[in-house]
Amino acid sequence: MIAHRQMGVNEAARLMREQHVGCLVVVDETLAGRLTVGVLTDRDIVTAVVARDLNPGVVTVGDVMSADVVSAGETDSVLDALASMRQKGVRRLPVTDARGGLLGLITLDDALGVISEQLHGLVEAIESEQQQERRRRA
């Protein structure tokens, strides 16, 4: 899900609620595509707007977004993405092309799901090998 800098925080919060997400990638629309310029999380809204009793209809996404975007490149591995998340203390990374154009979003849950599937496949391969070894010995 995306947002634009000039979008009201109230509109962004509604979008998050409707889409059941806790994060929006903030983009600028350019001729080269959607360039990632920030990230807005539900926590940003709570700490920067609600906790300060600001009017969410007046405050814009650009006012409260995190502009120091940590992103993953399109050729980065899941392990690279996890390392970036751990190093920067974030749970979500926009995935961008070489020019910073938004391609998607990877979350910690996504990465852990992929790793879990890989580990499950590894366990199945080991079990299969063990069964074959037992049959050869019998």
Image (tube, helix red, strand yellow):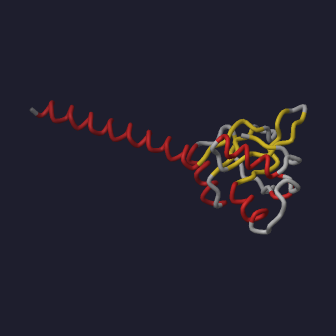
Image quarter where the C terminus lies is: top left
Q: In screen coordinates, is 103 left or right of 133? A: right
Image quarter where the N terminus lies is: top right
Q: Is residue 51 above or below residue 111?
A: below
Front residue of 126 and 3? 3
Give x and y (percent) for residue 79. Answer: 56, 48
Give x and y (percent) for residue 59. Answer: 86, 56
Give x and y (percent) for residue 133. Answer: 19, 35
Q: In screen coordinates, is 68 left or right of 31? A: left
Give x and y (percent) for residue 136. Answer: 15, 30
Front residue of 39 and 118? 39
**From this viewpoint, which residue is outermost toward the left?**
138
Q: Residue at x 44, y 40 (%)?
A: 118
Q: Residue at x 27, y 38 (%)?
A: 127
Front residue of 124 and 55? 55
Q: Residue at x 78, y 57 (%)?
A: 66
Task: Give the mark count.
Answer: 0
Tell me the quarter of the picture where residue 53 sits. bottom right
Q: Residue at x 49, y 43 (%)?
A: 113
**From this viewpoint, which residue is outermost toward the bottom?**
52
Q: Is residue 10 above or below residue 118?
A: below
Front residue of 104 and 74? 104
